[in-house]
């Protein structure tokens, strides 16, 4: 697989290099040189998740990883289902929260861990990542206890749910966590500063597990095919998929799936009050506002890192950005959507409720809708219990880690402080 740096097209790299390097020169994102269509997609859709995912990833990555090795990697990573649950006659929920940390990030985090374990040569690796909620837990659990790998996770202090936080701040060992006294965009800026610091990169063997890493992105392509595979065959070409969007890696993966032949009609980019992209798609003016804290905290991102990949994909495929539907809900509207969805018999959480509500607004009468449920409702127990007047039972992982002591350290949004901590 060959990839190029979107900001500096002269910089090209293979898949293994992109996985290990993370970002290109000038903080540029790597993008595949070739996104050719899959052969016989209909036959692929009849396969189970793991063998289908192996075929998809081999098509994207090429012969860089032998098929037997890739199969073992996928079998170790995708050990849980992604069921499509019918909500009503025209609407389905794709549940992506059946992995070990109860969030969609388990797909990408676990596959990336397999990639690094398989592709990296000897020497220390430090994974540095920022999280607005679910990435932290998925990455921490995927890499916990792996030899020669240290993980450093940054998150905005007080701006993710307590149970989300406990899932990754209670592990210790090779997992270090820092609560940054600012918002998620400041955490992302610290990660980018780290990758611009050659001394730090060389000293700790720096890598990133954010959705900027191509291995995580390609893993997410696979569950879009799973969603469509679970639809009745006659509905597949009518599918509209609504994606809760923060850093926009998830939507990017869906668009890559469409580019290589997924029979889906179109996508909806669903955001909260941090609505930089919906406003941009409407006005053509990129105008990020200050990030605000919301009920759907994993989407509290005003400067989405993956958006350049969306624009690049549309450019190379000749697609119009206007083909991407979009919308945003504030917290009051989110609560109302959560209540209405629960009244239909489906228990959800704020991110999924936003995707469902905007799907209903955008879906045509002859279309079938799928909305992505990116986290288990219990990860947002405090807000969901309050809004729905329920008492959600905690699944095993949340109950276990919720009772443990947080090992996190608080730091200012100051790169010099972070560098000293990492170098020390």
Image (cartoon, helix red, strand yellow):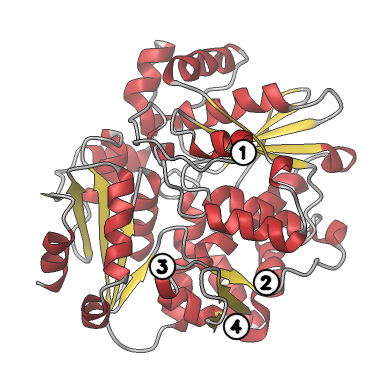
Q: Quadrant of residue 176?
A: bottom left
Question: Mark 2 = which residue?
Answer: 60
- Of the image marks 4 and 2, the number of the one nearer the N terminus: 2
Return the residue nearer the eye: 230 or 4: 4
Disc 1 from disc 4: Cα separation: 38 Å
Q: Nearer the viewer, residue 45 or 11?
A: 11
The residue that appears at 42% across and 20% down in the rendered structure is 331
Q: Residues within 10 Å of mark 4 (few under 14, many from 20)?
A: some
CA separation in Å, label 2 and label 1: 29 Å
Mark 2–mark 1 contact, CB under 8 Å? no
Relative image position of residue 403 (x, y in whole percent): 20, 38
Label 3 with label 4: CB-CB less than 8 Å: no
The x, y position of residue 227, in whole percent, is 70, 45
The Cα atoms of the two marked residues, 3 and 2, are separated by 23 Å
The circle drawn on residue 27 is 3
Earlier in the chain: of badge 2 and badge 1, it is: 2
């Amino acid at each position: 697989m060959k990839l190029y740096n979107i900001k500096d097209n002269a910089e090209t790299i293979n898949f293994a290099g992109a996985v290990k390097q993370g970002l290109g020169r000038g903080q540029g994102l790597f993008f595949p040189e070739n996104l050719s269509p899959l052969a016989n997609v209909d036959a692929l859709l009849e396969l189970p998740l793991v063998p289908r995912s192996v075929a998809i990833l081999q098509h994207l990555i090429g012969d860089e990883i032998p098929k037997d090795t890739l199969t073992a990697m996928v079998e170790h990573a995708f050990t849980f289902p992604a069921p499509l649950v019918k909500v009503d006659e025209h609407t389905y929920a794709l549940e992506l929260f059946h992995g070990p940390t109860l969030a969609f990030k388990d797909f990408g985090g676990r596959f990336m861990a397999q990639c690094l374990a398989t592709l990296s040569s000897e020497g220390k690796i430090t994974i540095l990542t920022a999280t607005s909620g679910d990435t932290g837990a998925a990455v921490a659990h995927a890499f916990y206890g792996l030899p020669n790998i240290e993980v450093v996770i940054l998150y905005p202090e007080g701006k993710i749910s307590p149970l989300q936080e406990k899932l990754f701040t209670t592990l210790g060992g090779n997992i270090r966590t820092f609560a940054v006294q600012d918002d998620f965009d400041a955490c992302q800026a610290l990660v980018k500063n780290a990758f611009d610091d050659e001394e730090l990169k060389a000293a700790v063997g720096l890598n990133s597990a954010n959705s900027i890493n191509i291995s995580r992105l390609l893993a997410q392509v696979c569950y879009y095919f799973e969603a469509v595979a679970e639809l009745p065959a006659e509905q597949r070409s009518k599918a509209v998929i609504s994606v809760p969007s923060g850093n926009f890696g998830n939507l990017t993966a869906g668009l890559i799936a469409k580019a290589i032949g997924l029979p889906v009609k179109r996508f909806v980019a669903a955001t909260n009050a941090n609505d930089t992209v919906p406003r941009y798609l409407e006005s053509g003016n990129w105008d990020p506002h200050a990030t605000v804290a919301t009920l759907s905290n994993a989407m509290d991102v005003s400067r989405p890192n993956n958006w350049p990949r969306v624009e690049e994909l549309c450019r190379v495929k000749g697609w119009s950005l206007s083909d991407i539907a979009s919308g945003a809900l504030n917290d009051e509207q989110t609560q109302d959507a959560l209540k209405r969805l629960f009244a239909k018999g489906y228990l959800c959480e704020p991110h999924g409720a936003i995707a469902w509500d905007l799907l209903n607004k955008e879906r045509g009468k002859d279309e079938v809708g799928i909305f992505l449920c990116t986290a288990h409702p219990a990860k947002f127990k405090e807000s969901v219990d309050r809004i729905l007047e329920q008492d959600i039972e905690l699944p095993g992982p949340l109950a276990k880690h919720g009772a443990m002591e947080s090992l996190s350290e608080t730091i200012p949004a100051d790169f010099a402080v972070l560098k000293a901590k990492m170098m020390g």
